Image: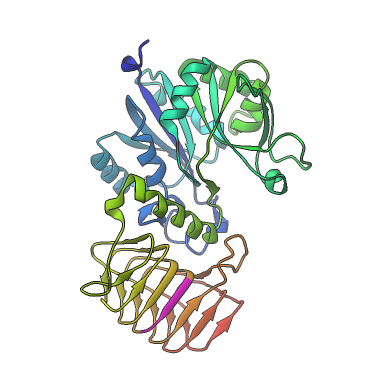
Amino acid sequence: MGISEERVVAVIMVGGPTKGTRFRPLSMNTPKPLFPLAGQPMVHHPISACKRIPNLAQIYLVGFYEEREFALYVSSISNELKVPVRYLKEDKPHGSAGGLYNFRDLIMEDDPSHIVLLNCDVCCSFPLPEMLEAHRRYGGMGTILVIKVSAESANQFGELVADPVTNELLHYTEKPETFGVSTQRKDRANLRRLSSFEALHDGTRSLPKDFVRLDQDILSPLAGKKQLYTYEMNGFWEQIKTPGMSLKCSALYLSRYRFTSPNLLASGDGTKSATIIGDVFIHPSAKIHPTAKIGPNVSISANARVGAGARLISCIILDDVEIKENAVVIHAIVGWKSSIGKWSRVQAGGDYNAKLGVTILGEAVGVEDEVVVVNCIVLPNKTLNVSVQEEIIL
C-alpha cells in the first residue's frame, strides 16, 4: 500500500472522573481533559498534533466521562479542524489497552493502515509525522515514542533497552524500583492495524477481560521479538498529573506557539494596550487595562478583567476572573469567577513539583483588598479577608 492510500486513525485516552484526583480542585467542576493550557483545552493539543499526520481519517477520544461533558467540544473541534472527532464512553475503567480492545470494531471501521495511540495528560512536542515515517521504515507491529531522562528521575517512568542500530525494543519495564535498565521513558505507541489487535487478543486470554494494561500486559511481553521499535524525540515531554505541572506545561505550549500558532500570542507595548512580556495568550473577550503588565507565561481566558497597574507573571487566569487595580499574581492559577482585590498579591515560589509550589484558587474564590496569599490551595467558594501562607483552605 502506498502512502497516499493509507488511512490513519488516532486514539486519545482521556481517562475519567475517578482518575486525576490529584488535579483537584481544578477538576472538581471541569473534566481534566478540558482544563485550558495556553488558552486551549488540554486535549486540544494532542488533537491538533494529530491533524499534522498525513491521511488522518478519524480521531477517537476514549474515556469514562459522561458523553454530555464532551459533546460541545467534540462538535466544535471537528468543525474547526475538518477532521471527524468522536468520543467513545467506557462503562467503567478498562485499563489503557482494555478500552482500545473493547472499541476495536469501531476503531477498525475505516480499515486504517496505522493507529496512533496517545494519552491526554501528556504535554509533548508531538513529532507524530516523523514518528509515523520511522514506523514505516521499521516494518514492525508498533513504535513507541521515547525520550531520555536522568537516572534520578528514571524510576518515575517506564524504562527500556533498545538496539542502538535498529532501534528494536529489547526490554521494557514499568516504573522499576531500581535504576539500571536505560535512560529512556516511553510515551505513546504507533500500532499497525491488524497485528495490534491480534496482540491485544492474545494478551487478554490469560488476563481479566475487563482490565488490560497496554504497557505491562501487551508491550512488555512483545519486547525482544522484533515486533516493537522506538523513536527517540528531542523536544519536550511532561506528565500533567497535578495543577502545578499544568502551569509548567502551559508555558511549554505557549513557547511552542511561536512556531506553530504565532497568531495566538499577544503583543503590546503599554501605549494603546497592556505591556506584554514573553509568551502570553489573551482571549479576545478579555478586558486588559493598558497600564497592566502581563507575562511571561500567562494565559488569560474568556471574559476575564484585569485592572490598571496589575502585574501578572507565570499564571493561568480562567473564565470570568476579575483582577483589580495594582494586584499582583505570580506562579498561580486563578479559578473561574474568582476575584482578586486592589493591591492584593496571590503568589507562590514556582516549584511545579511541590504540593504548595503553585498557589491555586478554586472556582469563585474571593481575595479581598490588600490581602496576601502565598503558597496556598484554596477550595471553591471561599472568601479570604486576611493574609495566608502555606495553607490548604478547605
Expressed as whole percent of the image width and height from the top left, the position of residue 103 reads 45, 28
**Residue at the image point whose x is 35% and y is 17% from the top:** 6
Above or below, 40 against 105 in this view is below
Expressed as whole percent of the image width and height from the top left, the position of residue 213 reads 61, 33
**Image quarter (top left, top right, bottom left or bottom right) of the N terminus:** top left
**Residue at the image point whose x is 27% and y is 39% from the top:** 81
**Image quarter (top left, top right, bottom left or bottom right) of the C terminus:** bottom right
Quarter of the view holding residue 53: top left
Seen as rendered, the residue at the extreme left is: 272
Q: Could you say which is closer to the camera, residue 33 or residue 285?
A: 285
Q: From this viewpoint, is residue 212 visible?
A: no
Q: Which residues are magenta?
A: 326-330
Expressed as whole percent of the image width and height from the top left, the position of residue 28 reads 47, 61
Q: Could you say which is closer to the camera, residue 147 or residue 79?
A: 147
Direction from residue 383 to residue 94 in the image, left or right = right
Q: From this viewpoint, is residue 301 visible?
A: yes
Q: Could you say which is closer to the camera, residue 72 or residue 66?
A: 72
Q: Is residue 123 magenta?
A: no
**Residue at the image point whose x is 54% and y is 73% from the top:** 348
Above or below, 299 against 75 in this view is below
